[in-house]
Image (cartoon, helix red, strand yellow):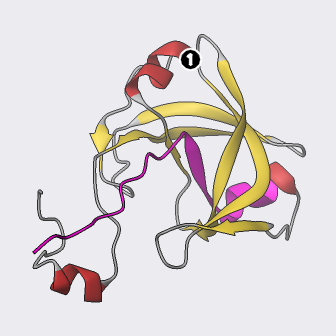
């Protein structure tokens, strides 16, 4: 039986906490939904920020919503080297302990995160129904 799986590349982006969103865009600011992502409940936002490392920066980095408990920057390993982020481990989203640091600049302020820069570990986003259909379980390596 032929099974098809959608494969996508995730470009550099950030997930932002409520506290950091207030600093970057102003107190009480709400993200502007641009388009839904393939992962249910996740969306790309109109807002952009600069991600700054020791050797350079990437302007215009996308924010993905909704807000999260902690701010996280996802770069490729090449991106991290290019802007001078010394430690961007390959990790699952949300696993940011002892990861890289950077500065995030928005139109109303900037935030220095002491940890939170990672290179996303390869992974699949799918609904529980699709996982059951493909006989897959959470955290399984495929």
Quarter of image, res 53: top right
Of all residues, the one furthest to the bottom in this rendering is: 129
Label 1 Cα crowd, 10 Å radius (few <14 / some 14-19 / many 20+): some
Residue 21 within the magenta-colored segment of the rendering: yes
Direction from residue 48 to residue 76 in the image, left or right? left
Magenta stretch bounds: 1-23
Direction from residue 51 to residue 78 in the image, left or right? left
The quarter of the picture where the C terminus appears is bottom left
Task: Determine if residue 31 is in view.
Answer: no
Residue 17 within the magenta-colored segment of the rendering: yes
Direction from residue 131 to residue 102 in the image, left or right? right
SS state under label 1: helix
Q: Residue at x 77, y 45 (%)?
A: 48
| Residue 1: image location, x then y, percent | 9, 75
Q: Residue at x 58, y 14 (%)?
A: 54
Q: Residue at x 75, y 41 (%)?
A: 49
> For mark 1, what is the residue?
83
Task: Say which of 81 and 18 sits in front.
Answer: 81
Direction from residue 39 to residue 91 in the image, left or right? left
Task: Determine if residue 81 is in view.
Answer: yes
Quarter of image, res 104: top right
């Amino acid at each position: 039986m032929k099974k098809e799986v959608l494969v996508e590349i995730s470009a550099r982006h950030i997930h932002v906490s409520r506290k950091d969103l207030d600093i970057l865009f102003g107190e009480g600011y709400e993200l502007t939904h641009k388009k839904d992502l393939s992962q249910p409940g996740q969306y790309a936002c109109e807002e952009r920020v600069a991600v700054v490392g020791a050797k350079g920066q990437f302007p215009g980095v996308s924010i993905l919503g909704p807000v999260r408990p902690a701010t996280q920057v996802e770069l490729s390993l090449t991106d991290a080297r290019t802007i001078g982020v010394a430690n961007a481990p390959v990790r699952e989203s949300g696993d940011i302990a002892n990861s890289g640091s950077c500065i995030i600049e928005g139109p109303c302020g900037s935030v220095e995160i002491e940890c939170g820069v990672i290179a996303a570990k390869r992974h699949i986003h799918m609904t529980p129904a699709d996982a059951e259909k493909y006989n897959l379980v959470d955290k399984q390596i495929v």
